[in-house]
């Protein structure tokens, strides 16, 4: 009989409170949720697999004692993870060892999945960090599992969204019986002939999106054949997320869409950066201050006086 795997996609643990949250004690909420995940893992004598972005910031040294304590509290526990972009300093592979997740790996508190299979519980678990190509398992006959941080989704989440189709990805990687995905903060599960591709969605609803108002933070339990969903105790989106924040974000998107439409007929200066061309357009067309403020926040660059 195979051991169980507890699956989790994007924890994004942090000591800073997101702007969208209304919690009186967000850190306490986060702690309770992650402790629940760890305790469920211990209760089932399972391995916790995390598909990247364990941390919301790659180098948060004040955060390191916090996450260390949570992991040590549940010892002995086996936790495996891959690097997401939020775990990676300046998106550089060479600096991964000098990050919060890198330190946890060096201390033996978290196993870093990679090209070489982690063997245990009847599984061969491979890891694919953000920006990498998935490894090819040594044996197609083994019970191979892939933990990957990449933009794999069931559908486009916005106009012109560049993503990898989840069902197609499962079809193209038949050497894996289970694929756990991170990066896209939406829950999905596709099963085909006993093979699964799963994203548990975000553990912490850090932004006030339409999806997050409905999302129920969950973990998935895999027993080698089937997936069981366990809801993580949580408050409703209406209680912990700010509508004011989502309305503000939607307003910014509308402002940018209108601005882009206005710029479509503009002839840009070749050899000049896109940002400089935008600020040139702003100056020459006396764009209103509200639009200028959104542009400054979104694209940065120098505002030409």
Image: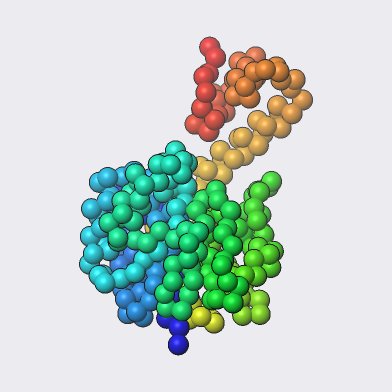
Residue 125 position in % (x across, y down): 48, 68
Q: Residue at x 55, y 76 (%)?
A: 142
Quarter of the view holding residue 251: top right
Residue 240 position in % (x across, y down): 39, 58
Q: Residue at x 41, y 49 (%)?
A: 87
As drawn, which residue projects farthest toward the bottom?
Answer: 1
Q: Residue at x 62, y 22 (%)?
A: 273
* Residue 21 makes an appearance in the image: no
Vertical position of residue 172 compared to residue 20: above or below: below
Vertical position of residue 65 compared to residue 44: above or below: above
Quarter of the view holding residue 166: bottom right
Q: Is residue 157 left or right of residue 124?
A: right
Q: Is residue 292 left or right of residue 93?
A: right
Q: Residue at x 55, y 14 (%)?
A: 304
Residue 155 position in % (x across, y down): 66, 59
As drawn, which residue projects farthest toward the right?
Answer: 265
As drawn, which residue projects farthest toward the top?
Answer: 305
Nearest the viewer among 186 and 67 is 67
Q: Is residue 291 left or right of residue 40?
A: right
């Amino acid at each position: 009989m195979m051991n169980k795997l507890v699956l989790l996609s994007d924890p994004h643990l942090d000591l800073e409170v997101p702007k969208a949250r209304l919690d009186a004690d967000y850190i306490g909420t986060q702690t309770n949720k992650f402790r629940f995940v760890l305790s469920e893992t211990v209760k089932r004598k399972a391995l916790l697999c995390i598909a990247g972005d364990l941390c919301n910031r790659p180098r948060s040294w004040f955060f390191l004692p916090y996450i260390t304590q949570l992991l040590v509290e549940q010892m002995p526990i086996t936790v495996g993870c891959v690097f997401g972009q939020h775990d990676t300093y300046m998106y550089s592979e060479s600096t991964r060892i000098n990050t919060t997740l890198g330190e946890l790996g060096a201390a033996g508190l978290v196993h870093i999945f990679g090209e070489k299979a982690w063997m245990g519980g009847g599984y061969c678990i491979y890891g694919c960090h953000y920006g990498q190509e998935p490894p090819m398992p040594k044996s197609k006959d083994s019970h191979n599992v892939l933990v990957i941080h990449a933009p794999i989704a069931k559908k486009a989440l916005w106009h012109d969204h560049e993503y990898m189709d989840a069902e197609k990805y499962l079809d193209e990687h038949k050497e894996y019986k289970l694929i756990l995905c991170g990066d896209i903060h939406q829950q999905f599960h596709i099963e085909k002939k006993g093979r699964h591709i799963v994203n548990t969605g975000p553990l912490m609803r850090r932004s006030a999106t339409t999806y997050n108002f409905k999302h129920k933070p969950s973990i998935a339990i895999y027993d080698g054949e089937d997936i069981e969903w366990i809801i993580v105790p949580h408050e409703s989106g209406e209680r912990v997320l700010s509508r004011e924040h989502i309305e503000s974000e939607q307003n910014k998107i509308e402002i940018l869409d209108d601005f882009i439409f206005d710029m479509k007929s503009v002839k840009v200066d070749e050899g000049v950066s896109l940002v400089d061309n935008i600020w040139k357009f702003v100056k020459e067309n006396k764009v209103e201050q509200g639009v200028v403020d959104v542009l400054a926040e979104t694209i940065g660059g120098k505002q030409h006086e």
